[in-house]
Image (cartoon, rainbow, N blue to C red):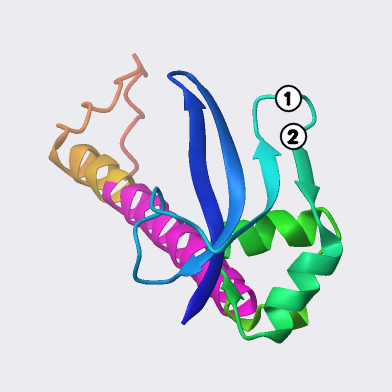
Amino acid sequence: MLSIRLARVGRVNLPSYRIVVQEKTSAPVSRALEIIGSFDPKSEPAKVDVSKERLDHWLKAGAQPTLSLAELLIKQDLLKVEQAPEVLHERKRREAAKKRQSDKRAWKDQVAKDIKARNEAKQKAQAKPEPPKQENKEPEPEKK
């Protein structure tokens, strides 16, 4: 199966990538069937150069883009989400993970509040009650 993916080139601390078409099982640094573009993440904004015709050709031939490349191409409006269905699945998975994390965080906060309230109630119960203040009142005369 063919894949369209990023192959890193460039020097240390200055990455740049080629967008290549390769067999999925081959190493990214091995020989590619075709180089269809490049990606420079260090430029501001990130620069993507892709031959749209060659990209369409390989997509029609059955090549599948990797998730990272598909996201990049979707941001650049070079690829539609429908052309990479695994992107939708991945986005849903990430959204569900974020929701689980926020629910877990809310639950932990609630438990912490409950523990704090219990500890405060316990301290109040253990505290010795203050003796009532006695005011100097004159004794009332006894009634007969």
In the image, 21 versus 135, the foreground residue is: 21
Q: Is residue 19 left or right of residue 83?
A: left
Q: Residues within 10 Å of mark 2 (few under 14, many from 20)?
A: few
Type of amino acid at the residue the image marks with label 2: Ala
Q: Residues within 10 Å of mark 1 (few under 14, many from 20)?
A: few
- Residue under label 2, please give it: 46
Rendering coords of residue 63 (x, y %): 60, 78
Where 108 sits versus 84, above or below? above
- What separation in Å lies between label 1 and label 2 (alpha carbons)? 5 Å
Where 130 sits versus 21, above or below? above
In the image, 106 versus 136, the foreground residue is: 106
In the image, 69 versus 81, the foreground residue is: 69
Write the start and end of the magenta stretch as one range.
87-115
Residue lying farthest to the top in this orientation: 136
Q: Tell me the tag on residue 16.
A: none
Q: Is residue 53 left or right of residue 25?
A: right
Query: Splitting the image into 4 quarters, where does residue 95 fall?
Result: bottom right
Type of amino acid at the residue the image marks with label 1: Ser
- Residue at horizontal 27 percent and vertical 50 percent from the top: 115
Q: Is residue 40 magenta?
A: no
Query: Splitting the image into 4 quarters, where does residue 42 fall?
Result: top right
- Residue under label 1, please give it: 43
- Residue at horizontal 42 percent and vertical 71 percent from the top: 24
Rendering coords of residue 140 (x, y %): 36, 29
Q: Is residue 7 left or right of residue 19?
A: left
Whether tag 1 and tag 2 are in contact, CB under 8 A, the answer is yes
Disc 1 secondary structure class: loop
Disc 2 secondary structure class: loop
Quarter of the rendering occupied by the C terminus: top left
